[in-house]
Image (spheres, helix red, strand yellow):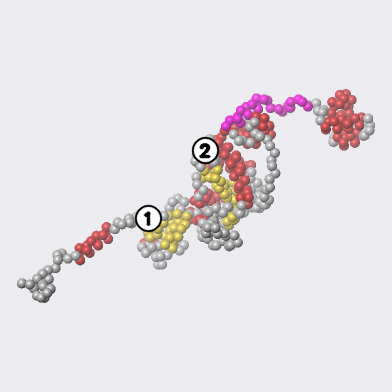
Amino acid sequence: MNQAERDRLVALKKAKKKLITQKQAAEEIGVTERQVRRLLRKLRGKGDRAVIHELQGRPSNRKLPPEVEQRAMGILSDPVYQGFGPTLAAEYLHKRHKLEVSKETVRQWMVKAGLWQAGRRRVVKVHQWRQRRNRCGELVQWDTSDHDWLEGRGEDLYLISMIDDATSRLFARFVRHDTSEENRRLLWSYLERFGRPLAFYTDKAGMFQVAVKTKQQEQREGRDRPEMPPTQIARALRELNIVWIAAHSPQAKGRVERQFGTAQDRLVKGMRVAGVKTLEAANAYLEKEYLPWWEQTLTVNASHDTDAHRPLEKGQDLAAILSHIEPRQVTNDYTVRYDGKVYQIDHDDIRVGMRKATALVEERMDATIAVRFQGRYVRVRRCALPVPGLRPQKVAAAKQSRQTATKPKRKSDWMKNFSIKSGRSPR
């Protein structure tokens, strides 16, 4: 008999001896007067055991058979499920093995089997969360995670993620390298699917801003940041009229950071169970399994139904905007050099003032080259590079002919019999 049952017994005995009314006993116990009358009748028949629940000590009618527990723990003991928590384990037992068990039951089984260690969560100091944006597309957080996504089963991969601040809608891809080109490629896919958001929120990585170079042991605190040329992504966002916001700490872009925490647990374990070993298989699992689960489970509705994404305008060519653009000088023979190659401008596209002027060379995502001069594209063709130290055949032949024409055929004999001392020819 526990303390609550003893307190109930004392109140019932007071009501039985009419020391208190049945109404007072009901208020003291926390039941109705009708229940008090039932307990008093039961007290007269069974004595003090009337306050003890009759099902105490008996197994529940809803208790699962021991065979189910043994099967579930046998499945979760497999190395492929190592590190699974009770919530994720319960989902996989239901989805893959048709065992419908609540996560709390799985938690108790795993603790008893030594597969999960229950413990108190420590209260840590956290940053104050800011309010979500009101509309989808007002702010999109953008970041990359470097993690052992395949757990040594394949090549090293990076996960680039874009998550909407208002709805937590996720858009992500696995890539082999965290480069500006791969990020621009994902940006292209995002813009084609959703449109142009109002702003992107990223860290201060080199692909988003050019670092200010300082001398050794020189500090920049308290100084204004000098104007630096934009990166390829920063230039593209300006042309698309998308605001770029830099986060000063990882906590500032906490939504995308917490998303990576979830992915490094659930996504890694899901790909382990699915046997993912390649980049293509990882992206396929991401598209078919993880992102639909995220959309169904973790996204929320924005406070306003209107979408802040803007459609691409007619003149916004993503192939040109998201290409790698560099300025190059047009030489006297109307060629431009880029990446160790020479490109000749078509004769019909040559205009006044082009020599020594600056043209923009665009390296597109499909590895093609486009040249733009004063806002207009010019046709170019690739030329063969001149070999150092090797003269062209025509130039060498012309020089040889000039040397042959000026060289005398034989030595002049006009001073043959001339004497320097006497000035007359010797006899």
Q: Is residue 47 left or right of residue 136?
A: right
> Which quadrant would residue 50 be assigned to in this image?
top right
- For mark 1, what is the residue? 382
Quarter containing the C terminus: bottom left
Q: Residues within 10 Å of mark 1 (few under 14, many from 20)?
A: some
- Residue type at mark 1 is Arg
Span highlighted in magenta in the image? 56-79
Question: How many labels were placed on the picture?
Answer: 2
Magenta span includes 112:
no
Q: CA distance from mark 2 to mark 1?
A: 43 Å
Which residue corresponds to the image point at 33% horizontal and 56% vertical from the top-left? 388
Which residue corresponds to the image point at 64% horizontal and 31% vertical from the top-left? 114
Front residue of this view, candidates 219 and 329: 219
- For mark 2, what is the residue? 152
- Residue type at mark 2 is Gly
Residue 114 in view: yes
103 vs 413: above or below:
above
Quarter containing the N terminus: top right
Magenta span includes 72:
yes
Which residue corresponds to the image point at 74% horizontal and 26% vertical from the top-left? 59
Residue 256 placed where, x, y %?
Answer: 60, 48
For the residue labelled by badge 2, is the local secondary structure a helix, a strand or a loop?
A: loop
Residue 197 in view: no
